[in-house]
Image (spheres, grey):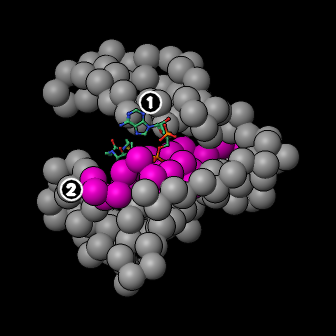
Amino acid sequence: MADVAALATIERACFGRDGADDLLAAEISRSWARVRVAELPGDGLGAFIDGWLVADEFEVHFVATRPERQRRGLAAMLLDHLLAEVFAEGARSAVLEVRRDNTPAQALYRARGFGVVAERRRYYDDGEDALVMQCALEGSLLMARPAHYGGR
Ligand SMILES: CC(C)(COP(=O)(O)OP(=O)(O)OC[C@H]1O[C@@H](n2cnc3c(N)ncnc32)[C@H](O)[C@@H]1OP(=O)(O)O)[C@@H](O)C(=O)NCCC(=O)NCCS
């Protein structure tokens, strides 16, 4: 909860959404939500990830990295750690929706083992399509992934 204001700042910078503080606080308090942050020594929060553990599936809702700290492996590290964590809690697959025009996020998810399994036409308010991406979780594979924060 102490990180809510910093998370809202990252959300504003990445998605242009204002006033997310209350929504984030509500999200953190849900027992089925998993919100994890990447803290940079002496530099505050660099990134965060949010999703829901629903039975044996994990739904990734948001991954966001401060613009000036992108392409250093933070989102990949958060995703890997959280997927390993929810695997230990019983999740056996992970699923998410991503805008068709969000090619950086799609590249991130593909690099972490997700593939497109469906499309949702005109899913977003502005008419953009969603791609549904899924990843089978397998413990030994998750543990073997390097946490490769580059610090460039
Ligand atoms: C998508 C996002 C979370 C990636 O965060 P990041 O910390 O920069 O990602 P990483 O450094 O961990 O990247 C890991 C891999 O993802 C891919 N990737 C990430 N950003 C990319 C980009 N802009 N272009 C192409 N590939 C990209 C690459 O394969 C990258 O590995 P590499 O750097 O070794 O080539 C970030 O761009 C962001 O916050 N975007 C705005 C919010 C958003 O759209 N979130 C996703 C939808 S909820």
Q: Nearer the viewer, residue 96 or 67?
A: 67
> In the image, which residues are magenta?
56-79
On the rendered structure, is 149 left or right of 106? right
Most extreme residue toward the right is 140
SS label for mark 1: helix
Q: Quadrant of residue 129?
A: top left
Q: Residue at x 36, y 51 (%)?
A: 70
Q: Residue at x 53, y 20 (%)?
A: 116
Assign ligand 1 to one image quadrant. top left
Q: Is residue 113 above or below residue 22?
A: above
Q: Position of residue 59 (x, y in %)?
A: 54, 44
Q: Is residue 92 magenta?
A: no
Q: Is residue 75 magenta?
A: yes
On the rendered structure, is 100 left or right of 138? left
Q: How far apart are the alpha carbons under marks 2 and 1?
A: 19 Å
Q: Which mark is residue 94?
A: none
On the rendered structure, is 69 left or right of 38? left
Q: Nearer the viewer, residue 99 or 42?
A: 42
State whether residue 100 appears in this view.
yes
On the rendered structure, is 91 left or right of 106? right
Q: Position of residue 43 (x, y in %)?
A: 35, 76
Q: Is residue 101 above or below residue 109?
A: above
Q: Position of residue 91 (x, y in %)?
A: 72, 48
First in sequence: mark 2 or mark 1? 2
* Residue type (three-letter) at the residue carrying disc 2: Ala
Q: Which mark is residue 106?
A: 1
Q: Residue at x 75, y 59 (%)?
A: 89
Image quarter where the N terminus lies is bottom left
Q: Which mark is residue 13?
A: 2
SS label for mark 2: helix
Most extreme residue toward the front is 152
